[in-house]
């Protein structure tokens, strides 16, 4: 056989011929009789912090019986069972929370949240829709601090 009798294997050459039109890939559905239990979502865990020793005063405002609860999905919930002002009018109690790891290194700081307008009658202040943090830091949280004002 002469060396030109067989084309070279594995070699692709460019030609001037038009390529065949491409067709969309075929789609199909595969049915199975296999039944498996759906994975159950991991249960949420939480950490709770309380800041009142027993009442915090800031200007005309006071805050008592409070809890910041942090959940493993990255949510935070704040509840103060008693917040009020001795001066009826425009006062609001405002808080900023900061999270720390076990070495007291800051790992997250929430924005400031404020209570509704206060008066001399105590109210319950709940804030469950503005406190979010990256859920991947949950296992690193070792402590929390609160900065507050009235």
Image: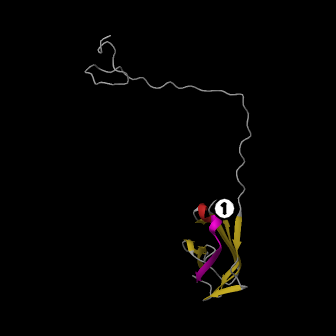
The quadrant of the image that shows the N terminus is top left
How far across and down, in percent of the image, does residue 32 sit? Answer: 68, 28
Q: Mark 1 points at which residue?
A: 72
How far across and down, in percent of the image, does residue 73 sit? Answer: 64, 59
Q: Please state the extent of the stretch shown in magenta in the rendering.
A: 138-149
**Residue drawn 70% across and 59% down?**
44
**Residue drawn 33% across and 25% down?**
12
Tell me: residue 7, above or below residue 29: above
Q: Is mark 1 on a helix, strand or loop?
A: loop
| Residue 30 part of the magenta-drawn span | no
Label 1 CA crowd tier, 10 Å (few <14, some 14–19, many 20+): some
How far across and down, in percent of the image, does residue 16 sit? Answer: 25, 21
**Residue drawn 47% across and 26% down?**
25
- Asked if one can make out residue 93 in the rendered structure from this viewpoint, the answer is no
Q: In which quarter of the image is residue 122?
A: bottom right
Colouring rule applied to residues: secondary structure
Tell me: residue 37, above or below residue 80: above
Depth check: give the residue in front, 117 or 37.
37
């Amino acid at each position: 056989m002469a060396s030109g009798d067989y084309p070279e294997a594995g070699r692709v050459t460019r030609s001037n011929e038009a390529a065949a039109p491409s067709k969309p890939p075929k789609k199909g559905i595969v049915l199975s009789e296999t039944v498996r239990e759906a994975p159950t979502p991991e249960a949420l865990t939480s950490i709770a912090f309380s800041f009142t020793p027993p009442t915090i005063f800031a200007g005309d405002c006071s805050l008592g019986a409070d809890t910041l609860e942090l959940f493993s999905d990255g949510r935070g919930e704040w509840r103060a069972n008693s917040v009020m002002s001795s001066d009826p009018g425009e006062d609001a109690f405002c808080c900023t929370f900061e999270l720390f790891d076990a070495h007291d290194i800051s790992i997250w700081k929430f924005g400031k949240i404020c209570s509704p307008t206060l008066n001399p009658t105590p109210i319950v202040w709940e804030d469950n829709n503005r406190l979010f943090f990256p859920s991947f830091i949950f296992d690193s949280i070792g402590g929390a601090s609160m900065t507050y004002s009235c």
